[in-house]
Image (cartoon, rainbow, N blue to C red):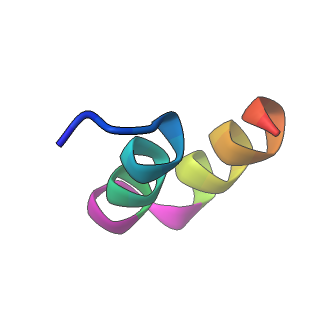
Amino acid sequence: MVKHPEHVAVANSKVRPYTASRVCLDFEV
């Protein structure tokens, strides 16, 4: 499942805690 970085971010957000994922997503965007 390596189509787009966004998909990976979503998967990470569901697997990993929302805190770290949120921060990562915010910085990525």
The residue at 47%/47% (across/down) is 9
Front in this rendered view, residue 14 or 2: 2
Q: In the rendered image of this protein, does residue 18 appear above or below residue 5?
A: below
Q: In the rendered image of this protein, does residue 9 appear above or below residue 17?
A: above
Front in this rendered view, residue 1 or 20: 1
Front in this rendered view, residue 2 or 25: 2
* Residues rendered magenta in the picture: 14-18
Quick one: quadrant of the C terminus?
top right
Of helix, strand and loop, which mostly describes the magenta segment?
A: helix
Please identify the residue farthest to the front as the structure is shown. Answer: 3
Residue 24 appears left or right of 26: left
The residue at 32%/56% (across/down) is 11
Residue 4 appears left or right of 19: left
Q: In the rendered image of this protein, does residue 24 appear above or below residue 18?
A: above
Residue 5 position within the rendered picture, expressed as x and y whole percent measured from the top left: 49, 35
The residue at 53%/64% (across/down) is 18
Q: Is 29 part of what is drawn in magenta?
A: no
Residue 4 appears left or right of 28: left
Q: How many marks?
A: 0
Please identify the residue farthest to the left as the structure is shown. Answer: 1
Front in this rendered view, residue 1 or 24: 1
Quick one: quadrant of the N terminus?
top left
Residue 2 position within the rendered picture, expressed as x and y whole percent measured from the top left: 25, 34
The residue at 57%/46% (across/down) is 20
